[in-house]
Image (cartoon, rainbow, N blue to C red):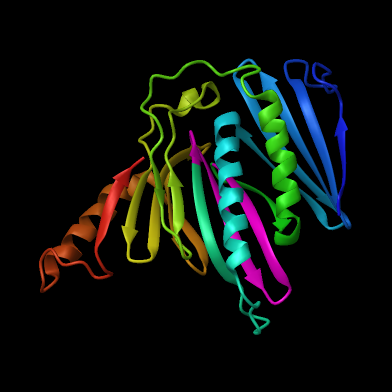
Amino acid sequence: MASRKTRRPRGQQRAGFPDTEELGTKELVFGDKKFYVDAKSNEQGQFMRIVETQTSGRGRITLDWDKAHELRDVFDDYLKEIATLGALPQDEEDQKQVKSAAIRQGKRRYFVDLRENTRGRFVKVTQFSGPNKLFVFISAENLQEFRDAFNELLESHDGTNPPPTSTTPSTNTQVQSGGGAVSTTSRGPSAAQVSDASLPEAREVRAGGKRFYFDVLQNDRGVFLKLSEVQARGRVHINIPHSCWSKMAEVFQQISAELPFPGATSVGESDSTGE
């Protein structure tokens, strides 16, 4: 059983962040691991921050208020899934990804993975923002209590400081169970990502049990494509600089034209979806 505390009343600001108002905070302690779940607000709207601390290091993620609701819904789905699972894997080297969800927020993408190994089950929440990767780990046995604290903050402060109204089309969600993915498209870039608004929207290609995500990003070296492959056992990605996109497209076309079965698909039926 975790110890849980509520710190800093609404309106009290943390030193060094005069433009950010802290609405509420939950502190959860699970053994040698401690979580701080913060509900915050600034001129761009409300957001949630999760900070994980333990002796071996520190992790954190930050997400907008509406995406925090989506993360809470993923937690609910995983709790139902965990209740149906049987024995843990017996092979020490076998780490299985039971289920995966993807949430998109502007140029950020979040992957929420339910995994298991011989030591137990856990949820890994990973935040990708450009080349940076941040993450937190929540054990399955503590997920219910974590979810309840997270949801309590959401319900207590819903609508306290709503973000500016967006005219961008609403979210599309695709769900695949049994180790598949929940893919959530963005409602449009927030003010924090407005400088990247001219970049193309992300794309998704499905092929059998795999998902391929195409994210156009930029850093101090220029524009690049982050191509991610997601399947049951994990995720890998490569970064492709803009300077070679045209050449790679030509290679794909040449290879496709040389196939003896025009229009065929090599890995099941696939389709693509713009986000």
Q: Position of residue 120 (x, y in %)?
A: 71, 70
Q: Nearer the viewer, residue 81 or 111?
A: 81
Instruction: Name above or below for residue 265 compared with residue 16.
Output: below
Residue at the image position 39 percent from the left and 30 percent from the top: 170
Can you say which quadrant of the picture contains the C terminus? top left
Range shown magenta:
104-129
Q: Is residue 128 magenta?
A: yes
Instruction: Name above or below for residue 237 compared with residue 43.
Output: below
Task: Determine the residue located farthest toward the bottom in the rendered image.
Answer: 91
Q: Is residue 220 magenta?
A: no
Instruction: Name above or below for residue 83 compared with residue 274.
Output: below
Q: Specify whether 121 is left or right of 56.
A: left
Q: Nearer the viewer, residue 133 or 42?
A: 42
Rendering quarter of residue 93: bottom right
Q: Is residue 223 visible?
A: no
Q: Position of residue 226 (x, y in %)?
A: 44, 49
Q: Position of residue 163 (x, y in %)?
A: 56, 19
Residue at the image position 47 percent from the left and 38 percent from the top: 218
Q: Specify whether 259 is left or right of 268.
A: left
Q: Main secondary structure of the magenta part?
A: strand
Q: Position of residue 197 (x, y in %)?
A: 42, 27
